[in-house]
Image (cartoon, grey):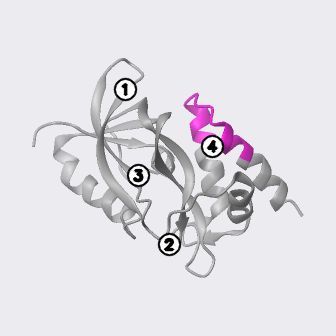
Amino acid sequence: MNETLWIFGYGSLIWNPGFAPSEQVPAQASGWRRTFCMRSIHYRGTTASPGLVLALDADAKARIEGLAMAVPASDRAHVLDAVRARELISNAYREISLMIDLCDGRRVRAITYVIERTHPQYCDLPLEAQARIIAQASGSKGPNRDYLVQTADHLRALGVHDPDLEWLVARVGALSTP
């Protein structure tokens, strides 16, 4: 396959893709919302005390902002293998291909990872419940609150305003203060 692979990041892939993109462009996708709807039992929590990580959840009225990352054809196979090993660790995510709009006017097909609503790790919690979990959870990649803060910081740097993430950052900070 000779074409560039595009990967759409909306959470930790933005700040820790695990590969060196040949191009990074702010992008948007329709029909999805970013939300802490996946219980993390590997990276930001444990099976005994799950954390929460972001996923794209279907919402016909939503439009999500994130980062499109280009992978040259020569790196396609090994990058895709590495991203799949990371993202599909428990089958709570489903890999899909979708059309995204790049901020420079291009429209490309990209892969991304969306929540599988029938998976036991799926949850739909109010923001306060999310904040309480994120404030205390920790897993093999560190505290859940670090994942939240890193994501919010990098979205802000891209010019993305996500009111739910901003509320969560403030609330988790308040819950974590002794």
Q: Which residues are magenta?
A: 152-167
In the rendered structure, does residue 10 fall within the stretch colored magenta?
Answer: no
Q: Residue at x 74, y 44 (%)?
A: 167
- Circle nearer the viewer, 1 or 2: 1
Query: Disc 3 designates what residue?
Result: 114
- Compared to residue 113, the image places residue 106 above or below, namely above
Q: Secondary structure at mark 2?
A: loop
Q: In the rendered image, which quarter is residue 73 located in?
A: top left
Q: Secondary structure at mark 3?
A: strand
In primary-sequence order, the first of circles 1 and 4 is 1
Disc 2/disc 4 C-alpha distance (Å): 21 Å
Query: Disc 2 designates what residue?
Result: 42
Q: Are marks 1 and 2 in contact (CB under 8 Å)?
A: no
Query: Disc 1 designates what residue?
Result: 101
Q: Give coordinates of residue 157: x percent, y percent.
A: 59, 33
Q: Residue at x 52, y 68 (%)?
A: 43
Q: Amino acid at mark 2?
A: His
Left or right placement of residue 143 versus residue 43 in this view:
right
Left or right placement of residue 29 versus residue 122 in this view:
left
Q: Residue at x 30, y 25 (%)?
A: 107
Q: Quadrant of the C terminus?
A: bottom right
Disc 4/disc 3 C-alpha distance (Å): 19 Å
Q: Secondary structure at mark 1?
A: strand
In primary-sequence order, the first of circles 4 and 3 is 3
Q: Amino acid at mark 4?
A: Ala
Q: In the rendered image, which quarter is residue 98 located in?
A: top left
Query: Disc 4 designates what residue?
Result: 152
